[in-house]
């Protein structure tokens, strides 16, 4: 039996959500599938659908993959160890698409079916948050939440997280553009925290600007006023630059996307490497932006944001 975990794109609020400000994230059709294989001893095999090669999680991440399995077995109470899980993905593993959250959700959904665990989405979300901690040490919870529930979500971390579905008429077309450089979310969260401690006054101003922007963004997203959403995404990118998580590669992608007519473009996820997002509601525009970024040598993904799994 198989389980699917969907990827995500953050339209607003990466890093700011770590400090309790609201963010807007959407699920996308790119996903990770986990399939149960019976009666074989051994670990997990990983197989990348796109390249046909084994997913390269890198030595560090492969070690974490073992920890992830331990967390999942502990939290679900599964005693059986004599099985293998096959993982396949069509997502970028460079960062920004929520691949670690999708991994957790896919494994949990698969084991839930296989062992008739009867766990609901709320519990899948909670356990995937534990998985996220293995990868990112102090995540906000936005990635596991959007991977579990899908849609276009308003997320705010708190004693109890606020999670609301923003009603959009239909998923919106975007392009995700891969810098090809892997990022480390835990490291970048720590970097931003350090910058914040060293530049308190500047960060207070940035946080105030972002909080105001997020409320405006919510209204525009709910009304599917994509031109306005795009222009707010550009403003969000300006704030992300100021907290030090952009890079020359991301800027090159953003510039090319905007020149091709994208309504807005910014980094998505932890930044520095990873992926960028360009807002392109029309099919032709999506094609145009994707072509331009591909011509510059970047891998692109034409997807829609806000799908319900
Ligand atoms: C990563 O997708 C988003 C960050 O804000 C980290 C988090 O919220 O856990 C950078």
Image (cartoon, helix red, strand yellow):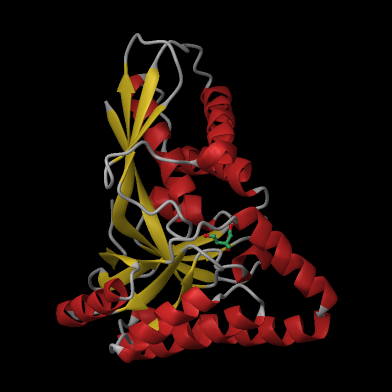
Q: Residue sitting at 35 percent across and 68 percent down?
A: 298
Which corner quadrant holds the N terminus? top left
Q: Residue sitting at 60 percent across and 81 percent down?
A: 241
Q: Is residue 129 above or below residue 284?
A: above
User: Can residue 160 be seen in this snapshot?
Assistant: no
Find residue 231 and report its image quarter: bottom left
Q: Which quadrant does ligand 1 occupy? A: bottom right
Q: Is residue 277 left or right of residue 61?
A: left
Q: Is residue 3 above or below residue 295?
A: above
Q: Is residue 31 above or below residue 156?
A: above
Q: Position of residue 216 (x, y in %)?
A: 48, 86
Residue farthest along the left direction in this orientation: 284
User: Which of 69/27 is in front?
Assistant: 69
Q: Position of residue 137 (x, y in %)?
A: 67, 48
Q: Residue sitting at 56 percent across and 68 percent down?
A: 272
Q: Is residue 297 left or right of residue 216?
A: left
Q: Is residue 260 above or below residue 111?
A: below
Q: Position of residue 162 (x, y in %)?
A: 55, 61
Number of numbered labels in the structure image: 0
User: Which of 98/64 is in front?
Assistant: 64
User: Which of 216/16 is in front?
Assistant: 16
User: Can residue 292 be seen in this snapshot?
Assistant: yes
Q: Is residue 110 left or right of residue 128?
A: left
Find residue 179 and report its image quarter: bottom left
């Amino acid at each position: 039996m198989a389980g699917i975990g969907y990827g995500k794109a953050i339209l607003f609020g990466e890093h700011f959500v770590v400090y309790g400000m609201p963010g807007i994230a959407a699920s996308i059709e790119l996903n990770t599938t986990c399939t149960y294989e019976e009666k074989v001893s051994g670990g997990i095999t990983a197989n990348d659908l796109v390249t046909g090669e084994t997913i390269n999680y890198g030595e560090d991440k492969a070690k974490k993959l073992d920890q992830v399995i331990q967390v999942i077995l502990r939290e679900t109470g599964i005693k059986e160890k004599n099985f293998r899980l096959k993982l396949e993905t069509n997502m970028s593993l460079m960062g920004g698409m929520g691949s670690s959250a999708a991994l957790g959700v896919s494994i949990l959904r698969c084991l839930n079916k296989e062992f008739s665990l009867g766990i609901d989405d709320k519990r899948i979300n909670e356990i995937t948050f534990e998985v996220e901690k293995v990868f990112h040490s102090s995540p906000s919870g936005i990635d596991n939440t959007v991977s579990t529930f899908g849609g276009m979500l308003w997320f705010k971390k708190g004693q109890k997280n606020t999670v609301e579905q923003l009603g959009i008429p239909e998923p919106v077309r975007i392009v995700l553009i891969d810098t090809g450089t892997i990022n480390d979310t835990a490291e970048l969260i720590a970097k931003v925290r350090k910058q914040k401690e060293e530049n308190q006054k500047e960060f207070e101003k940035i946080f105030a600007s972002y909080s105001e922007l997020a409320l405006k963004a919510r209204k525009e997203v709910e009304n599917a006023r994509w031109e306005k959403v795009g222009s707010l995404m550009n403003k969000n990118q300006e704030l992300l630059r100021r907290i030090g998580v952009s890079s020359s590669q991301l800027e090159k992608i953003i510039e090319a996307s905007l020149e091709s007519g994208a309504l807005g473009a910014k980094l998505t996820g932890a930044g520095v490497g990873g992926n960028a997002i360009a807002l392109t509601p029309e099919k032709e525009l999506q094609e145009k932006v994707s072509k331009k970024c591909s011509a510059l040598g970047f891998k692109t993904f034409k997807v829609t944001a806000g799908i319900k799994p």
